[in-house]
C-alpha cells in the first residue's frame, strides 16, 4: 500500500509543481492524475512535457476519474464511451492504471432491477476498454440518506450492495473501500474480504463527528482521518492488507471542514495522520523507493546509485 494525495479528496488548488512539492514534503508516494488536463498538456506540448514533473519527483500515479458518466442518459454515455479509448491511451502514458467512479444512489426513471442491469452492461463495455491497457475501475457509493431523499427508486448505497454489483461485472471492475461508507452505512470493514480477489482498487480514509448518529450524517460532515477517532483508519488498513491490497490509500474530507487551515497545513496533517494509521495498524515502514546499489568485484559502489529517502509503502 502507498500513500496517495488527491486534490479532490482534500480539495486543494495550486500549480502542479506546488502540489507535487507538498506531496513530497509530507511523505506521499503518489498523486491522482487530472486526466483531461494531462491530455491537454500532452496534445499541446507532448507526453514527455506533460509527464515531466511527476517523473522528476518520482511520484507514482494514483487514480484518475473515469471520464464517462455511468449514470447518464444513453446519448451522453455513448459519447463518453466513444471518447474513452483515446483518453485511456493518455492515462497509460501517465502510468495511471486505476480509474474511479461513483455509482448513482437513486433514480426517478429506473427501478433498482433496471438500473442494476444498465450498470452491468455499461461496466462491461468500459471493462473491455480498460482491459486493453491492464487498467481497473474502482466504484464507490454515496451512503448518505440525503443523496437518496425524494427519489422514486433507491439504488446501491452500501459497500455490501457494491460487492453484489462487482461480483457480476467485468473482471476489470472493482471497488473502493471507503471508511466513510462503512461508517455511514453501518457496515463492518470485514466486508472487504467478500470482494472477489484482486478487485480492491483504492482505500479512502475519513473521520466523522462524535455527536451525530451515523445514519444522520451528511457529506459535508466528512472529516479528515484522525480528527475525532470515531472511524478507525487502522481497522480498514488491516483488512485491506489481509486482502493482499497494494494500491493507493487516500485521505478524504469535505471542503467545508478544511476552511482556514491553509494548503500546506492540510497536506502536512494528512501525511501525519496516514503515518499514524500505518503504525497503529502494525504495517511496516519501509523505503518508499529503493534503487539497488551496483558494486564492482571488490564490493565497492559503482556510480551514483543510492537508496532513496525513507517513506511508507
Image (spheres, helix red, strand yellow):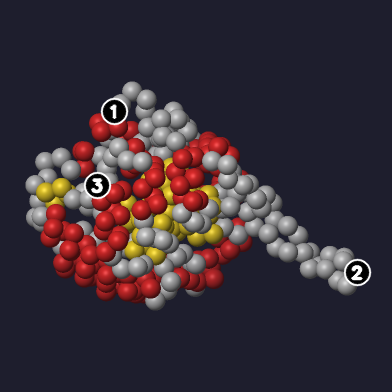
Nearest to N terminus: mark 1 or mark 3: 3
Q: Is residue 264 in sight in this rendering?
A: no
For label 2, count other residues whose C-alpha is less than 10 Å away and answer few (under 14), some (14-19) or many (20+): few
Q: Based on the displayed image, in which of its 4 quarters is residue 53 positioned?
A: bottom right
Circle 2 sits in a helix, a strand or a loop, which is it? loop
Q: Which residue is mark 2?
A: 298
Residue at x 36% of width, y 48% of height? 191
Nearest to N terminus: mark 2 or mark 1: 1
Q: Which residue is mark 3?
A: 157
Nearest to N terminus: mark 2 or mark 3: 3
Q: Position of residue 146 (x, y in %)?
A: 21, 38
Q: Position of residue 302 (x, y in %)?
A: 83, 68
Q: Is residue 90 left or right of residue 77?
A: right
Q: Which residue is mark 1?
A: 213
Q: Between marks 2 and 3, how big is the CA–CA gap?
A: 62 Å
Q: Position of residue 145 (x, y in %)?
A: 21, 38
Q: Is residue 205 left or right of residue 1?
A: left
Q: Between marks 1 and 3, how big is the CA–CA gap?
A: 17 Å
Q: Is residue 48 in sight in this rendering?
A: yes
For residue 32, above or below residue 284: below
Which residue, as the protein is rendered here, is positioned at the far right? 298
Amino acid at each position: 500500500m502507498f500513500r496517495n494525495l488527491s486534490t479532490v479528496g482534500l480539495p486543494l488548488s495550486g500549480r502542479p509543481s506546488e502540489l507535487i512539492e507538498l506531496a513530497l514534503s509530507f511523505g506521499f508516494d503518489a498523486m491522482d492524475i487530472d486526466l483531461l488536463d494531462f491530455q491537454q498538456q500532452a496534445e499541446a506540448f507532448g507526453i514527455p512535457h506533460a509527464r515531466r514533473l511527476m517523473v522528476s519527483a518520482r511520484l507514482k500515479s494514483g487514480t484518475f476519474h473515469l471520464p464517462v458518466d455511468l449514470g447518464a442518459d444513453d446519448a451522453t454515455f455513448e459519447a463518453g464511451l466513444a471518447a474513452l479509448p483515446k483518453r485511456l491511451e493518455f492515462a497509460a502514458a501517465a502510468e495511471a492504471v486505476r480509474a474511479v467512479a461513483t455509482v448513482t444512489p437513486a433514480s426517478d426513471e429506473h427501478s433498482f432491477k433496471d438500473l442494476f442491469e444498465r450498470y452491468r452492461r455499461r461496466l462491461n463495455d468500459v471493462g473491455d476498454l480498460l482491459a486493453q491497457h491492464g487498467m481497473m475501475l474502482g466504484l464507490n457509493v454515496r451512503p448518505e440518506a440525503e443523496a437518496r431523499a425524494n427519489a422514486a427508486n433507491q439504488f446501491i448505497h452500501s459497500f455490501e450492495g457494491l460487492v453484489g454489483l462487482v461480483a457480476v461485472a467485468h473482471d476489470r471492475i472493482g471497488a473502493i473501500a471507503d471508511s466513510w461508507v462503512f461508517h455511514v452505512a453501518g457496515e463492518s470493514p470485514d466486508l472487504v474480504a467478500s470482494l472477489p480477489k484482486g478487485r480492491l482498487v483504492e482505500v479512502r480514509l475519513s473521520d466523522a463527528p462524535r455527536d451525530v448518529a451515523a445514519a444522520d450524517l451528511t457529506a459535508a460532515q466528512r472529516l479528515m482521518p484522525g480528527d475525532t477517532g470515531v472511524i478507525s483508519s487502522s481497522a480498514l488498513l488491516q483488512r485491506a492488507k489481509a486482502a493482499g491490497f497494494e494500491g493507493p490509500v487516500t485521505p478524504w474530507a469535505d471542503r467545508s471542514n478544511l476552511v482556514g487551515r491553509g494548503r500546506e497545513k492540510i497536506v502536512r496533517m494528512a501525511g501525519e495522520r496516514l503515518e499514524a494509521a500505518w503504525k497503529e495498524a502494525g504495517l511496516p515502514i519501509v523505503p518508499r523507493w529503493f534503487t539497488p546499489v551496483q558494486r564492482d568485484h571488490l564490493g565497492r559502489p559503482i556510480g551514483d546509485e543510492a537508496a532513496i529517502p525513507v517513506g511508507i509503502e
